Image: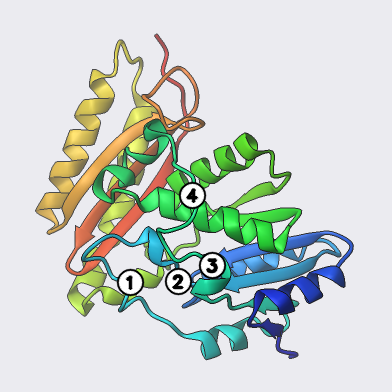
């Protein structure tokens, strides 16, 4: 299969973009591609649009002591996986996206209600870094459609709000979480798990699934106390399985605010050895007050 065209500078990207007057569908990644990424690329091909993938490990979304330096970088393998799937792959440099230097130029700040909760409470500034790099990627690529996975549900929600707030005219499409055979959500960070930890890791998805089922089966919620109790029981279950849970929370699926009468999402993050795992599931009922 034909390898995608590799673009290594913003000038090469601009030249490629001028040759694509029609729709351009975009899948931003940090590389080390797995089946979840490839599912997004396949979804991008459901029309005659040109498909471009970016590979960039963004320094501004990693905090002190996080895994920026050791984050897996596998560009040659990624390009081979994208053969026959993507038309082009952009490999921007830091200077392409941050000409004044990371942290030195202009930037956007994610509203605290969206960015400082859930994962943001444990990774200060992370979503500011995500929003800034995606905004810059969009400005260079100028896509008509961009695809992101539902595993990073908080990120997905923030990027939808970013596009709306800045009137970027990009259609954000969510791809369902792709899972291993035992339910573990696919992630580049899963390779940090030891063999024994990998055997325990599916307990995160199993715990969330059971909590969502119990919420759906509840006859009524007089207040949020029932949900809080379910979340606490899930935290306890994860501790028993050797996790260090950061949070398990029922949230409004649209705003990520406190659970309301609308659709709900159950989100969680937990550490297992050297890996930080995140996941989320749909709660198939509404709170009745």
Residue at left 39%, top 40%? Answer: 115
Residue at left 42%, top 32%? Answer: 256
Cα distance between the residues tagged 4 and 3:
12 Å
Along the horizontal axis of the image, is 65 left or right of 165?
left
Cα distance between the residues tagged 2 and 4:
18 Å
Mark identifier at residue 99: 3
Q: Nearer the viewer, mark 4 or mark 1?
A: 4
Q: Is residue 34 visible?
A: no
Along the horizontal axis of the image, is 200 left or right of 46?
left
Q: How crowded is mark 2: few (under 14 residues within 10 Å), some or many (20 or more)?
A: many
Mark identifier at residue 68: 1
Expressed as whole percent of the image width and height from the top left, the position of residue 268 reads 31, 46
**Secondary structure of residue under mark 2:** loop
Cα distance between the residues tagged 3 and 2:
16 Å
Cα distance between the residues tagged 1 and 2:
8 Å
Mark identifier at residue 107: 4
Q: How crowded is mark 3: few (under 14 residues within 10 Å), some or many (20 or more)?
A: few
Q: Can residue 100 be seen in this view?
A: yes
Residue at left 69%, top 38%? Answer: 167
| Quadrant of residue 104 within the rendered picture | bottom left
The mark nearer the N terminus, 4 or 3, is 3
**Secondary structure of residue under mark 3:** loop
Which residue is nearer to you in this view: 209 or 258?
258
Mark identifier at residue 57: 2
Q: Which of marks 3 and 1 is in front?
A: 3
> Marks 1 and 2: CB-CB under 8 Å?
yes
**Quarter that holds the C terminus:** top left
Q: Residues within 10 Å of mark 4 (few under 14, many from 20)?
A: some
Expressed as whole percent of the image width and height from the top left, the position of residue 247 reads 24, 42
Which residue is nearer to you in this view: 106 or 177?
106
């Amino acid at each position: 299969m034909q390898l995608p065209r590799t673009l290594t500078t913003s000038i090469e990207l601009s030249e490629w973009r001028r040759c694509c007057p029609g729709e351009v569908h975009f899948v931003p990644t940090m590389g080390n591609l797995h089946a979840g990424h490839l599912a997004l690329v396949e979804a991008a091909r459901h029309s005659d649009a040109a498909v471009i993938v970016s590979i960039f490990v963004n320094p501004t979304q990693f905090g002190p002591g996080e895994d920026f330096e050791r984050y897996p970088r596998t560009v040659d393998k990624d390009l081979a996986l994208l053969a026959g799937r993507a038309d082009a792959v952009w490999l921007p440099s830091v200077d392409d996206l941050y000409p004044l230097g990371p942290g030195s130029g202009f930037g956007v700040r994610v509203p605290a209600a969206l960015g400082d909760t859930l994962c943001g409470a444990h990774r200060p500034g992370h979503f500011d870094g995500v929003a800034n790099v995606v905004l810059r990627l969009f400005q260079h690529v100028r896509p008509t459609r961009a695809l992101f996975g539902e595993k990073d549900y908080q990120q997905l929600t923030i990027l939808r709000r970013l596009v709306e707030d800045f009137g970027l005219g990009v259609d954000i499409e969510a791809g369902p979480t792709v899972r291993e055979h035992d339910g573990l959500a696919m992630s580049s960070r899963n390779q940090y798990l030891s063999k024994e930890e990998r055997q325990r890791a599916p307990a995160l998805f199993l715990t969330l699934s059971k909590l969502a089922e119990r919420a759906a089966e509840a006859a009524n919620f007089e207040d949020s106390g029932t949900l809080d109790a379910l979340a606490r029981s899930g935290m306890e279950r994860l501790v028993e399985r050797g996790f260090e849970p950061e949070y398990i929370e029922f949230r409004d699926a649209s705003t990520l605010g406190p659970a309301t009468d609308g659709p709900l999402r159950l989100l969680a993050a937990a550490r297992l050895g050297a890996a930080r795992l995140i996941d989320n599931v749909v709660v198939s009922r509404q709170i009745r007050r």
